[in-house]
Structure formats: structure tokens, C-alpha cells
Image (tube, rainbow, N blue to C red):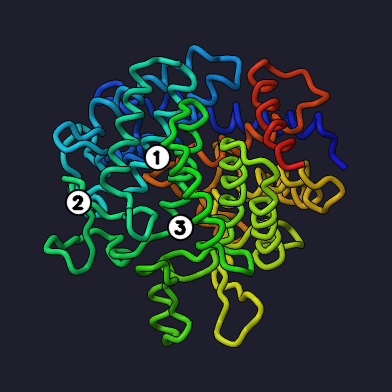
Amino acid sequence: MISAKMLVEELTCALNEGILRRWYPLVVDKEHGGYFTNVTHDWRLPPGQEKMIVSQARHVWTTSKVAEFGNDADTYREIARHGYLYLRDVMWDREYGGFHQILSRSGGPSDVRKWRNEKRAYGNAFGLFALSAFYGLTRDPEVLETARRAFAWIEDHCYDPCDKGYFEFLTREGKPFDRSSEYKTIADDGNELGFKDQNSSIHLLEAYTELYKVWKDEKLRERLAGLLLLIRDTLVEQRGYLQLFFRPRWVPVSFRDASPEERNENYGLDHVSFGHDYETAFLMLEASHALGLDKDTRTLTVAKKMLDHALANGWEKRIGGFYDGGYYFNGDDHCTIVRDTKNWWAQAEGLNALLLFSRIFPGSDYYACFLTQWEYVKKYILDPDQGDWYEGGTDKEPHFKTGPKSHIWKCTYHTGRSLMNCIALLSEHCEVSSGVEKRKREIDHLISHFT
């Protein structure tokens, strides 16, 4: 069995050489601010560099955390500040508040994905997530005020006081809209219109957790606790997976009674997304810990059930790797794999969850699964020539060897967080930086909260 020291060396190389030194400062847009979005497989910057709030914010979050974690704090602090200024001065809508969903490279309108000037709760969640992390790094009062303003905008415009949860689709002015509204969307996510969803919910949970770590506000605490209970007790199906979209009164969207053609057409609205399940398991544990919920066995039980369900139904035991999608067909008590591809972010989140749960449940099989998963990532996801991670496992999708390294949905957030957490968890007997030791203490506190 590979030693912890060797694992730390491999993971550190994958982080520093494979990711950080490839991405930064390459993606820093010194002319227009923020970060370049599109990067080819061999690290060239092609024409067409729209700026989406999600990826812009994820870069700020990652570099803020790396500035605390590694040995080159000043460099990554400045890269994070560069992105923060772009969020504050360009991505934030100075007229109506809230973060623009997408802009052109120069800060004007963009027709990518046909979002026009609409806003999304999901995108605003990541904007707040980034601001919270940057404030955690700098303790600059101005940054906290910017974060507080972003939190207030989400609460004022997205929160549903009747059915709870948050509306996803908003006009530029911050007015929620649905299929019956006078305003009509042409965006490519328009099939999700009118539903509440797990994805914006879990990332609001993540953002509110990050903010609550550094700002103990009572309203924030109330909303964070409410999100945790909503996700844990309503969004998670009793078998241990997240239902994806919901009609009013939290009725799950389902196409089990539809034709195969209609079901396939609406796959994005109704399937089992294994990666989101164990990512959410981790985020729920973080939220419970941040809230200081004593003896929170309910959250731990549900989180473990979600990881166990993914391992039992969505993991390829022979070589590792989590599949993209499963489905419970009518009359079946087992989950059928309907998408056997293995996207990069789910593999990264799998590493993080497996290693964390192996520490909460010593003597379990989680550590052996983590080792298998890391071997899978090394063989099929890491690019040995150009660095970084392929977008999908090449055992299923070899064409990703020449696919882009970056686009609006792919950057350094999932991979960076996973590698930093895994390095910290395995660092007991290794010489590491003070930043790694700090991250290890934080994760140890999380583990002790549940053991």
C-alpha cells in the first residue's frame, strides 16, 4: 500500500505543478480585469473570452485559499485581490445590485448561453462564496461590507418566504420569474424555469457556511440552518440521493411515467447525480460544524447514506471512478446507470469525500476506495503531458485529451479544494507548510465534531 508520505508528494505535485503553476498567472486578464475563461488543451488563450460570475468567483475563492495554504502567499493574495476588484467593480450591477450572470471580456453584454441581462441565484451564491473567502484571507472591512451587500441582495430578491428555499431565475432588476411571467427567457437553461433546484440550494449552503465562518450574523445563521434542514430532510430522497428539481410545495420533478424519448430529453431535470450527492454530504457536514450543532447525528447519518449510495450504485469498483448519472425506473428497486461517463469534478469531489469519511469512520472501506479513486484519477484524468485534469475520464471519453482545459464551468475550484483537503488530511507525518497545518487543524475540528 502506498505510504501517506508518497501520497502527499503526489497530491502536492498535482496541485502545484499540475494546476497552480499552469493556471496562474496565465488566466489573469490584466487588460480588462478578472480572469480569462477559455483555455485550450495546450494552454493557449483563444478568441472569445466571456466572463461568467461562477468561474470568476471560483478563481477568487481558490486563490484566496491557496494564499493561506501554500508557500507563495503574496502572489496568490494579489491574484485573488485582482479578481475581487473585478467582482466588486464590474460583475456587480451598480444600478440594480446582484451579480451579472455573464459579460463580455470588456464588461459589456454577452450573447453566450442567451442569458442576456438575467441573474441567477446560483451565480450570486458563488459571488458571495468568493467574497467570504477573500474576507477570511484579508480581514479587510470593505470586503466584508461587499459580502454583506451580496448576502442582503440574495435574501431580498431570491428568498421565498412562503415555501422557503430560493428562486433561481431573476430579471436584471432582481424580480423572480417563471413560465407564467410576462418576461420570457431565451436562455439555454430555460427548461429549468419555474422550478427550485438542488444545485443552487447546495451552493447557497456552501456560500452561507463560508460567510458564517467569518461573520456571526443572526439572520445568516437562521438562513444557513434553514438551508441545511431543507436539503437534508426534503431534497434528499430516503434512499440517499438528491432529487434535482422541484415544483411548488417541494414536489419533485419526475419523468418516470414519461416515454423514453421524453425522459431522455429531460435527463437534466431528473436523474441521480452521484457527484452532487457526496459533494453535498461534505457541504452538509461543513454547515453543521460551522453552526456548532451539537450531537448532530441526523446530518451525519444522511451524509453517510449519500456517500454509501453513490459507492453502491455509481462507482466502478474495478478501476474506480464515479459515473455521471443513474436512474430509478418505475418498478425497480435498484439504480440503473444511464450515463457511464465520469466527469472531472465528480472525481475530485469523490477523493475529498472518501478520505474525509475514512477519518470519521476509521476501520471502514472508505480509505481503500480513496486509494483506488486516486489511482483512477492518475491514470485517466490527470494530463501527464500538459498538466491539469481532463474534463472527463479517458477510459470513457478519450476525446477529452484534446478538449479545453478551461471554460465557463471548468476551472480550479473542485480540484483545488479536493487536493488541498487531501494533502492536509494525510500530512500528519510529513514536513508541510504552516498553511497546510492550519488547514489540517480546521478539518480535524470538523471530524471531531462528528466523532
Q: Identify the mark at residue 175; answer none if there is no mark.
A: 2
Q: Residue furthest left?
A: 182
Q: Tell me which residue sits at (61%, 68%) in the image.
A: 238
Choose top left, top right, bottom left or bottom right for residue 430: top right
Q: Position of residue 195 (x, y in %)?
A: 34, 64
Q: Identify the mark at residue 126; answer none if there is no mark.
A: 1
The mark tally for this picture is 3
Q: Is residue 171 left or right of residue 315?
A: left
Which residue, given by chain and number where applicable, does mark 3 sit on? 198
Q: Is residue 47 left or right of residue 375?
A: left
Q: Please, what secondary structure does the residue beneath circle 3 have?
A: helix
Q: Residue furthest top?
A: 74
The amino acid marked with disc number 2 is: Lys
Tell me which label, 3 or 1, sits earlier in the chain. 1
Q: Is residue 229 placed above or below 435 in the rendered structure?
A: below
Which of discs 2 and 1 lies nearer the camera? The answer is 2
Q: Is residue 328 placed above or below 58 in the rendered structure?
A: below
